[in-house]
Image: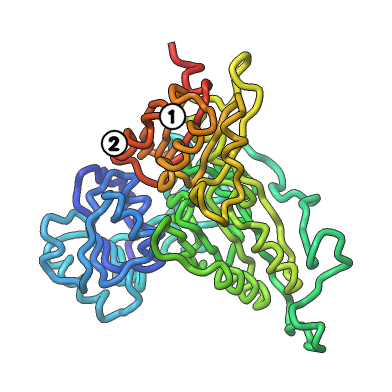
Amino acid sequence: MSANPYPLGLRLAGRRVVVVGGGAVASRRVPALLDAGADVLLVAPEVTPALRAHVDAGRLHWRPRRFAPDDLDGAWLVQVAVDDPHAAASVSAVAAERRIFCVRADDRAAATAWTPAVTRHGPVTVAVLGGGDPHRAMSVRDAVRELLTARTGLLADPGETVVVGVAAGAQGPVPAGLGSGEAPPPGPIGRVSLVGAGPGDPELITVKGWRLLTEADVVVADRLVPGLLLDELRPDVELVDAAKIPYGPSRAQEEINRILVDRALAGKVVVRLKGGDPYVFGRGGEELLACAAAGVPVTVVPGVTSAIAVPAAAGVPVTHRSVAHEFTVVSGHVAPDSPVSLVRWEALAGLRGTLVVLMGLKNLAAITAVLTHHGRDAATPVAVIQEGTTGSQRSLRSTLGAVAADVVEAGLRPPAIVVIGDVVDALTT
């Protein structure tokens, strides 16, 4: 009979943790280590876009090569996140020689430490070990989470809206290719849920969104989703990194659509997890139409949009009595002078209310220039909030005429929200 594991909470702030592997498992584990304040060293020839975003932000160190024994110099813990058992065994052998605890994603029996099923509720963290059975641990964890959130009864909403068909008003599912006489795929069809994960704080996902996430067989996640949510997925969940890093590598939207449809037609329960809200510059409508055209049922779960939540987290209300009676949200990912821009910046310059710009950091100089050119006062207050609602949140206050230069000097980077208007100073004293 094997001995029971000894439960322990590791205080990793400032201590070196080595993660070997740069794939989906590492993408799930690294956010929790960063949240614990660990000094993370990632060793892998290649990494996912989500991990590369952490590297680019300076949150962790990356050695782009295969593991070497000296990678464990000064380490307190090592997590092996590779699917090659021989490579994993060589890492754990070095860890054993140095008396460093080692987590093995490929073989729990060969590991000297296990990662528990975790749920977080404010300052409370609950970790469940199921005697080596991850499904048992997840079941207990989920029951505890329901108690912590003081929810009783069935969380599922029997009246939730499920969209099926090629468009609103369609008479029923229209599987792709049926116009040419092709038969629908055999077997039961799964479903797709477009879930808004919120602006960055993992506790800002809705209860329904979290519940659907726990039921998923496949999760297709963007870079901006809270990483700690991925840490709570079942170990057998297929995680597809659909990260769209600004101005960097991305997976074509058509490929994302294909993955959603293919997995659902194979009978899988699929969650498309998106930062903020699926329909606020999230291309959720394109994904719904692709699924509906293939006869795949789709549930849309709204999310807390960063357009409102991030300014609020920085002390900026988008409206305020006697200051702003309107607010406008626009995308700034296309330059104002681009022929493909759909935004009438000259009209926005004439508004008296609040202007919230998403994805506009790259074009901020051009945006502020066109607004001032068309009459918006260069002294108008502006706030720029980077990674709002997260532990990495940074804020900058400036004016419309100076903010572009101030952002460069401060080294702010995406994701960031730009708020233009008198509401920026509405709560200052």
Q: Residue at x 53, y 28 (%)?
A: 375
User: 25 or 151, which lies in front?
Assistant: 25
Residue 384: x percent and y percent? 42, 34
Give the amino acid type for the residue marked by disc 2 in the picture.
Answer: Ala
Q: Residue furthest front?
A: 373
Q: Which residue is mark 2?
A: 410
Q: Is residue 162 in sight in this rendering?
A: yes
Tell me, for residue 400, which label it has, or none: 1
Q: Judge from the rendering whether residue 122 lies leftward or rightward of residue 299; answer left or right.
A: left
Give SS at disc 2: helix
Q: Residue at x 57, y 40 (%)?
A: 345
Q: Residue at x 45, y 56 (%)?
A: 223
Q: Residue at x 46, y 49 (%)?
A: 226
In the image, is residue 60 above or below residue 235?
Answer: above
Residue 213: x percent and y percent? 58, 56
Split into 4 quadrants, where in the image is the N terminus? bottom left
Residue 140: x percent and y percent? 53, 53
Residue 71: x percent and y percent? 15, 64
Q: Residue furthest bottom?
A: 181
Q: Residue furthest right?
A: 171
Q: Earlier in the sequence, mark 1 or mark 2?
A: 1
Mark 1 is surrounded, within 10 Å at the Cα level, by few (under 14), some (14 to 19) or many (20 or more) other residues, namely many
Give SS at disc 1: loop
Q: Judge from the rendering whether residue 162 lies leftward or rightward of residue 132; answer left or right.
A: right
